[in-house]
Image: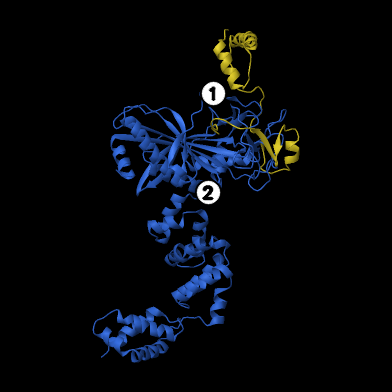
Chain colours: A blue, B yellow
Amino acid sequence: MTETATLAAAVDRYEVVIGLEVHAQLLTRSKMFCPCPADYTSAAPNENTCPVCLGLPGVLPTINQQAVDFTVRTALALHCDIPPFTKFDRKNYFYPDLPKGYQISQYDLPLSVNGLLEFPVAGESVRCGITRVHLEEDTGTMHHAGDVLQSATSSLIDLNRCGVPLMEIVGEPDLRTPEAAREYLVRLRQILTYIGVNDGNLEKGSFRCDANISLRPRGAHELGVKVEVKNMNSFRAVQRALESEIERQTGVLDAGGTLVQETRGWVEAQGRTISQRSKEQAHDYRYFPEPDLPPLRLDAAFVERVRATLPELPEARAHRFQQQYGLTAYDAAVLTDTRDEADTYEALVAAGVPAKLAANWQSGDVAALANEHHVPLQHSGLGIDGLTSLLRLVEAGTINGPTAKELLAELYVSGGNPEALVRERGLAQVSDTAELSALVDAAIAANPAAAADFRAGKQQALGQLMRAVKEATGGKADMPLVNRLLRERLSEQ
Amino acid sequence: MTLSRAEVDHVATLARLGLSDAEKDRLLGELEAILGHIARLQRVDTSTLAETAQVGDLVNVMRVDVPEEPIGAAAALRNAPATDGGYFVVGAIQGTELDT
């Protein structure tokens, strides 16, 4: 059986239950509990550290207000309740990437609970509950032997990332397919980047996902044994890892075996998960309230103040784009994919570019150029203003489509004023009927065979005549007009 | 308040303490004394008091998100037993990374 067929057969017999846990670094300037810079990628190892994040004795952590704001903003975007009282707790464990011997996290009274994320899967709307969104701190990074020229018996520790604000978003086990898990993450990442709290980089680990997955026979009420899958650093990896887990778990259950509750790591190169069970006993984190941090009372006024900072969310914006600009659902989704994309579109329309014209160009040629040069429009030579000028020239009929495409590609890289360039190079479209009529006559005279073919009913023959007129104007002819004039002249006897 | 030897073993493991049997026997007694003291406190009637994790009245103490100069790697590493190229060096880690 093929992989897909095996999976389909498994899903026939077993119900798949998936719950996702996402860790997202917050885009604050300083760390969670100390004022060290939160940038851990560009600094030399251990450069952005201080006694607080180094876990030295006798220090006092302080709460970064921006991180609290960002977490509440996220919670509100995910329709969570914000309890009036919240506090931090210590989660105790020894590991060299966390020098304090504990992580400051939240245990029984998190910042927010009971939310909801709605997202499309294959055209259907799926809802997944959000258990909680809470705030904690990231750990340092470790380079194991092999990464660096080191003896095989040691690890290198960099604590620049230690203490960076980390938000944990725990989803309910409401997901039923690997595809739904993937789409949940796509939508969640989109929302986090829209509201400006996270940069959504799975590869670099600023947005990380762990998945809990279990199988139960269809119709059963009790949940099956849960396996936690880690090490997935792309949307595709999440989907593949879960598919592979479904196959593995199905195999064990079909053979009459029992599954073990454990953590498994996704190994991309092998396309399978591998047990990470250690000989250690079950985790015993001995949570207790963090005595060094006063609790937070977040009143309604505070919550409303944060709510006011929420931008229009992608789903609502896509819906509005359809209503307000008459776009298709597909175009609206493409143009609201990122906040920058949607802002660009609305800037074009606000500057007078017709909605449909702006949509076609932005999602077509402009998107292709952005992709090709790895530069978004707003940072290109052309910029939003340049594109506005260019599209106004198209709309006014000053230049034709092919000329506009050429100019777009050139100006995207080199920059410049489209109007000035059109004047300078004489690129204005030839749309004078008398002038074009003369060229149409000349084209027919020069291509008698094509003219005769067309008159005999061969539609394709028109192409040769169109090209002749186009060449005669140096590519600047108003081609829809040429088409009309040619047809009129050829239909005359 | 009685504590089992297995509980002492468990706590020692969590604390990464390598203790001899004699030390465990001694600590069993000391820990029982501490727990006994807490057990006495637990007999006090607190039914009329609000539950709290802190004795101070402070709430909402927060810092604005403005970075300050860190102490830097040289100072951070000054007391480290082993370093290499700006990193702390520790013994190789066996087993899995824990949850964050």
- Contact (Cβ within 8 Å) of mark 2 with mark 1: no
Which chain is mark 1 on? Answer: A
Residue A373, image x, y percentages: 53, 63
Q: Chain of mark 2?
A: A
Which residue is under mark 2? A193
Q: Amino acid at mark 2?
A: Thr
Q: Is residue A295 visible?
A: no
Q: Residue at x 35, y 49 (%)?
A: A122
> Which quadrant: the N terminus of chain B?
top right
Q: Residue furthest left?
A: A456
Q: Is residue A364 left or right of residue A410?
A: left
Q: How many marks?
A: 2
Q: Quadrant of residue A158?
A: top right
Foreground residue among A327 and A465 = A465
Measured Cα–Cα span from mark 2 to mark 1 = 34 Å
Estimate the x, y position of residue A463 in percent, counting from the top left: 34, 80
Same subunit, labels 2 and 1: the answer reads: yes
User: In which quadrant is the C terminus of chain B drawn?
Assistant: top right
Q: Is residue A32 left or right of residue A117?
A: right
- Viewer-proximal residue, A391 or A36? A36
Q: Residue type at mark 1? A: Asp
Q: Residues within 10 Å of mark 1 (few under 14, many from 20)?
A: few
- Seen at 67% across and 41% down, the residue is B64
From where the camera sits, is residue A12 visible?
yes
Q: Could you tell me residue A330's position as x and y percent? A: 39, 57
Q: Say which of A385 and A44 sits in front.
A: A44
Q: Note whether B50 is above or below B44 in the view shown.
A: below
SS label for mark 1: loop
